[in-house]
Image (cartoon, rainbow, N blue to C red):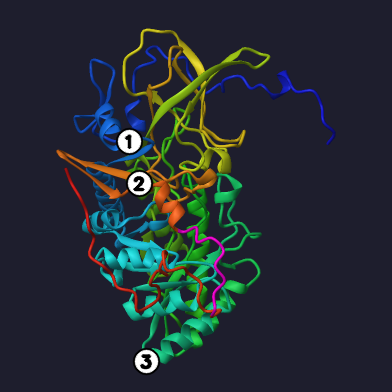
Amino acid sequence: MPAHIAGILHATPPPVWLPYPEDVNALMPSLWPRSVAKNEAGELTIAGHRVTDLARDYGSPLYVLDAADLRHRAAGFVTSFQQAFAAIGTEAHAYYAAKSFLCTAVAEWVAAEGMGIDTCTLGELMVACQAGVDPQTVGLHGNNKSDEEIAFALDWGIGRIVVDSFDEIPRVAAAARARGVTAPVMLRVTVGVEAHTHDFIATAHEDQKFGLSLHSGDAFEAARRIAAEEHLDFRGLHSHIGSQIFESSGFDIAAARIIELRARILTELGVDLPEVDLGGGFGIRYTSQDTPLPFSEMAERLAAVVASACKATGAQLPVVSFEPGRAICGPAIFTLYTVGSTKVVDTGSGERLYIAVDGGMSDNIRTALYDADYSCTMANRRSESEPAVVRVVGKHCESGDIIVRDEYLPNDVTRGDLIAVPDTGAYCRSLSSNYNHVPRPGVLAVDGEQIGWVIRPETHADILAWDTGFAPAADPSETTSASAPAPTTGADAPCEERRSTTR
């Protein structure tokens, strides 16, 4: 469209869901890890540690992880779903969705609470391996698995490979045959459900890259081909409808359709599949407008749906598995920033206070990518000033570099203040980048009295170390410089013991 004069049409008032605060310094506990509070001076604390001290000692921006909170959420999910499905006469298993946020410490913690690990790349497999996770509790997803990923999975002995295409069936079978093993596989089915979420994280409608369509008949044909392969052990069916989902209706439809397909496979192919995986996508509360269901309530609803679907088809109850990620790690981490500058902007329909911090879309791309909403609080002091509508923005050379689109903060926020943004555990560090050559923040874990890195912060030296300059290789196979050795990958890569530091 042609250029035009900007102005009031580009200004947006605060959203109707954003309430005017009675106390602009107060926290909404449901948005924060369980040990987070504010002291009398208005300083944010985690497990009694002041974030002003954390910023002084460890710098900012900084991802701050409440380790006990993450373990509590993992244990709560496992217990709620096991109890709900035991009540209908079957088992429920939980696989932590590694893509949401993964490091060896987190892999160890969720495994200790009874969760498996759901991976989708070689890198995620290697982290789970290095963390000492039982390979039988690990699964491999992915719509474009490499030969190297399939080889690693089979050599390590993981418990499930989720087949995503016709091409993958003979490739996995051939890799298993070459090793003299039988590969445990599940089939990812596109069930044709429109989850109530952003288009980019809805994964069960027909026109997208994941799975094989139930509607077109591809899913049943894939099941027939898997059943015919001698070196494939057909374990079950898999469905994932999307992410950040607050109600169970999408799962209801998906479960019914998956159970119907399972019954057809038994009737026509004679294969009794022991397991059904309904995926993850359980939503969390990012702002006051979000209303996620408690684990126990969601578990009871889903157990009832599975029981009803099995009764309707006359099928035996399968083992049912789920893949929560965001619901486990999302609320357990917040991001701490330092304010660099502020400015008041006349939007044409009022004033907005812009607060620029020392991070941005390189450490939280979700606002730009998914139009996500976040909350925030001033973290270093209490203010008696009036609330103002603010927009927290980053330092990157993009107008879309927004972290918090709309929030009320004191109108005296100034350079040097600390701003904390809750619920940044999922898909923030995982999707982070070095845009504008900005180093990615580290992840600092607080576990009671102990504090230590689980992922160290990057430095500019780290970024520059990969910049080799132009050095033509005498041998075309030489793809790295002497100063930046090639990383070890593949089935021969070691699973090193985790090295951690604590204070």
Circle 1: residue type: Gly
Earlier in the chain: of badge 1 and badge 3, it is: 1
Kindly state the secondary structure of the residue where label 3 is placed.
loop
The location of residue 489, given as percent across then percent down, is: 40, 73
Q: Nearer the viewer, residue 161 or 49?
A: 49
Of badges 1 and 3, nearer the viewer stands: 1
Task: Look at mark 2 in the image and give the residue it sits on.
Answer: 457
- Assess whether mark 2 and mark 3 are in contact (beta carbons under 8 angstroms): no
Q: Residues within 10 Å of mark 3 (few under 14, many from 20)?
A: few
Q: Is residue 52 above or below residue 116?
A: above
Q: Which mark is residue 180?
A: 3
Circle 3: residue type: Gly
Earlier in the chain: of badge 2 and badge 1, it is: 1
Quarter holding the N terminus is top right
Q: Is residue 196 left or right of residue 298?
A: right
Region of the chain picked out in magenta, as a range: 466-474
Kindly state the secondary structure of the residue where label 1 is placed.
loop
Task: Look at mark 1 in the image and give the residue it sits on.
Answer: 59
Q: Nearer the viewer, residue 99 or 191?
A: 99
Q: Is residue 300 left or right of residue 249?
A: left
Q: Residues within 10 Å of mark 2 (few under 14, many from 20)?
A: some
